[in-house]
Amino acid sequence: MRQQSAIVAVIQNGHGRFLVTFNAKWSGYAFPMIAVPEGGDILGSLAIQAVEDDLGCRLSAATAAELDYMSRFGVSQRSGEETLYEYQLYAVEPNQPLDLLAAPTWNNNPPMFLSYEELTIRTDLTWSTSAIVQEFVENQEVWQDTREIRAGKEWEEQIADGLRSTQVVIALLSPHAVRRSTDPNSPDNVDSVCLDELTFARFTTPPTPIVPVMAIPCEPPFPVFRLDYVAITKWMHSEDEYRLGFQRKINDILCLQLQRWPMPN
């Protein structure tokens, strides 16, 4: 079976949007990527080179961190052969402003930054880019305390292990989730366990990134009070509001993963 390997550069701007450039070979927008030379090493420097080639500039201060590995079976459009496509993703930090206006333009298709939602709905992306976006999100595993805790074991220890092993904590905020024993409307006069979980995630070493999601209006607790939150408080009344909030939540998760240490293969 035919096999092709490529290194993919993933760059986000300050608004969490992803850099794509027009790939004339495949007639569509794609993440900057470069083929792995036969017998060559898979290195972050190649990811930086892919960006330099696409944007026509030097990135002398850029850094690259290994992000993920993906593979997909497909049929080569050129040869018609079944092919195993392998992608090694690197998060590239340019460490300098990117002048997209000065970059080469193919068929009046300039490079651009797209949001995660745009990456999922645009029809002018290469199939490999769509596959990378889809798999990168779908491969994430969710640990939920009400589902993963096993009977007969110390629940506090299991929650701590779950928080240590996760890469991003999604905090669904509601009056019940952030209640204190001193709250006059507290139904059980005890502090919410969620408060302990957030404190553990925020202040343990190393800290775990948190994406707060305001599900029902309430005052954010101290561990996440200064963090920007995703508001979906109208989710019960509007499907569009829920969809927009959900897409923003996904984008925030991807942002945090790219900013953190490399994901395990």
Image: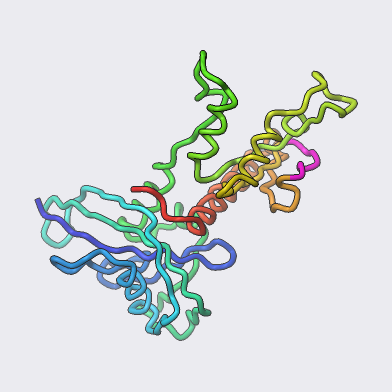
Residue 199 placed where, x, y %? 68, 41
The answer to which of 187 and 99 lies nearer the viewer is 187
Image-based side of 3 in relation to 150, left or right: left
17 sits to left or right of 141 = right
**Secondary structure mostly seen in the magenta stretch:** loop
In front: 93, or 3? 93
Identify the coloring: rainbow
Quarter location, residue 104: bottom left
Q: Residue at x 59, y 50 (%)?
A: 248
Q: Quadrant of residue 238?
A: top right
**Residue 200 painted magenta:** no
Q: Residue at x 52, y 18 (%)?
A: 153
In the figure, 221 relative to 133: above or below? above
Residue 123 percent location from the top left of the image:
40, 57
Q: Which residues fall within the magenta stretch?
A: 216-222
Q: Nearer the viewer, residue 85 or 195?
A: 195
Q: Is residue 218 magenta?
A: yes
In the image, farthest residue toward the front: 205
Q: x and y percent of residue 224 in the render? A: 71, 47
Asked if residue 185 is positioned above or below residue 72 in the image, the reply reads above
> Could you tell me which residue is drawn at 37 percent across and 65 percent down?
9
- Residue furthest to the right in view is 184
